[in-house]
Amino acid sequence: MAKPGDALLFSVVRRDHRPWLLMLNAAVATTGGLLLPAALASAVDMALSGTFVLFTVVWLLLLAATEIIGDAIGIVLAASTTSRATAWLRRELSRKLLALGHPSPFAAGDAVSRVTGDCGNAGGIAVTLITLLVTAVSSAGAVVALALLDWRLAAVFVVSVPLAGLLIRTHMRMTADDVLTYQEVSGEVSARLLDSVSGLRTIASAGIAGRETNRVLEPLPRLAAAGAGMWRTQARMMWRAGLLLPAVEVAVLTAAGFGVMQGRLSTGDVLAALGYAALGMGIVGQMTQLTVLERTRASAARIAEVLDTPVPRRPAPKPSNGVIELRNVSVDGALHDVSLLIPAGTFTAVVGASGAGKSTLAAVLGGLSSVDSGEVAGHDSVGYAFERPALLGTTIGRSIGYGTDADEVRVREAAVAAQVHDVLVRLPHGYDTPLADAPLSGGEAQRVGLARAIIRDPEVLVLDDATASLDTVTEAKVDEALTTTLPGRTRVVVTHRPATAARADLVVWLEGGRVRGTGTHRELWDDEDYRAVFTGGQ
């Protein structure tokens, strides 16, 4: 039965020429393998007769060399085919996950599991299919070869075919559900583990390590049940196949023995018959590949789930010379019918209690997050800095210039503007210090993230609590530096500090995902509820 990811797997196989090379090589090696038992039989008969035929020996060696060299080439082609297919899947999946934006419908750990494990599994589809196809062709060829030796041998072998087919069908049916469950639960465990790793300090300070461990490991019984189901099915199929193969060989050997007694077959033919019987039952011996195929299809279904997820409506912001306007914007669970006009070149502070929708509003302003309804008219050049920036790049300097072609001078200028230059020059290798060797505090990391936003020279700069870890004096210096470095630019700052709101030209006060009020800090301060935003109701 077709699965959602089967079409994706077909695309993976079709897009590259290497599977065809692999199949051609497999065809040559398989042909050599099918001819080898007959050549070996001729060599045995030659030896028993006490004669020497050069062609027989050379033919045997040539076929053996063909199979050996073909297997070696096949290993190289299989690795190349799998790696290229895996890279393509990871690239397509990563692009889609980035296009889905924030917040993503897929948990971070689960997304990592799909990009790493599932893409790795699905990338091997061409090799798996070719292995099964070659085995099936080899089995069919072995039956033909038995018939050419003696039709009675083929008739004895064919009796086992329905049993082999039943084993294969039963194995695939019983494995499919367990494999899919195993993949899904693995992704869930990865998601929980990543969440815990991200919050290690919080977990340790709260003294709930044991409880968090139990939460992360809670899906393990389902994972174990699915894994045990796969192994039970595998074991059941393997012992049945293990009984079927020798039974078929004994039956063929018995029929060949009667052929020798009646003079229809030679001693070498008996040896060839045993070789062809083993080749014919090769498809049963590929039960593990059938499990791999089901795991591959399950992984492809998980990848296709992401690729088929529609990208949220995120219209490109219209150039507006720094003016940002929201018209009846709503984001499910965060913002409700927000209409807002931020004039060009203004310093706007967004304030509100926790959960008021400040970060969501900041994300919407620059098109970082989609909206469920309404319109956003803003600028297409927006720089972001966050409370907990993810620093990327090989060195601290490249982290500031990440995603740009900025030279060292521009990197330093941005660091100076963000008031972090003096910190970075004291690092072991200055701006060339690897990120892993740069012991930055929370405030220093925030300023590096701010420098990364500054270096892009945006028309609109959005700071989502990006100075929350700075003291008031340093924050004021950063504000002054931004005014000098980015003159006339529109700035939007999410803040909890009254001093920051007091410096702003415009304050947007959010409450429950709605705009409660706009104006200057002085104008809004007369409202007791507004004061409570900063005083906690005291």
Image (cartoon, rainbow, N blue to C red):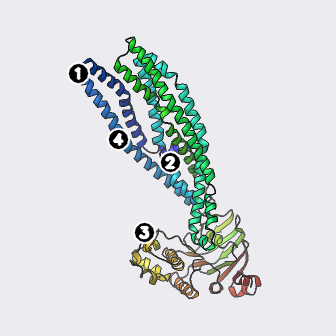
Q: Which mark is residue 52?
A: 1
Q: CA distance from mark 4 to mark 3?
A: 38 Å
- Mark 1 belongs to which amino acid? Phe
SS class of the residue under badge 3?
A: loop
- Compared to residue 324, the image places residue 282 above or below, namely above
- Mark 4 belongs to which amino acid? Ala
**In this orientation, does residue 436 appear?**
yes
Q: Position of residue 221 (x, y in %)?
A: 63, 52
Q: CA distance from mark 3 to mark 2?
A: 29 Å
Q: Which residue is mark 4?
A: 72
First reached walking from the N terminus: tag 4 or tag 3: 4
In what quadrant of the picture does the C terminus appear?
bottom right
- Mark 3 belongs to which amino acid? Thr
Q: Residue visible at 59% across and 57% down?
A: 189
Q: Is residue 377 left or right of residue 274?
A: right
Q: Residue visible at 49% across and 25% down?
A: 247
Few, some or many residues within 10 Å of mark 4 (<14, 14–19, 20+): few
Few, some or many residues within 10 Å of mark 2 (<14, 14–19, 20+): many
Q: Which residue is mark 3?
A: 394
Q: Which residue is mark 2?
A: 121
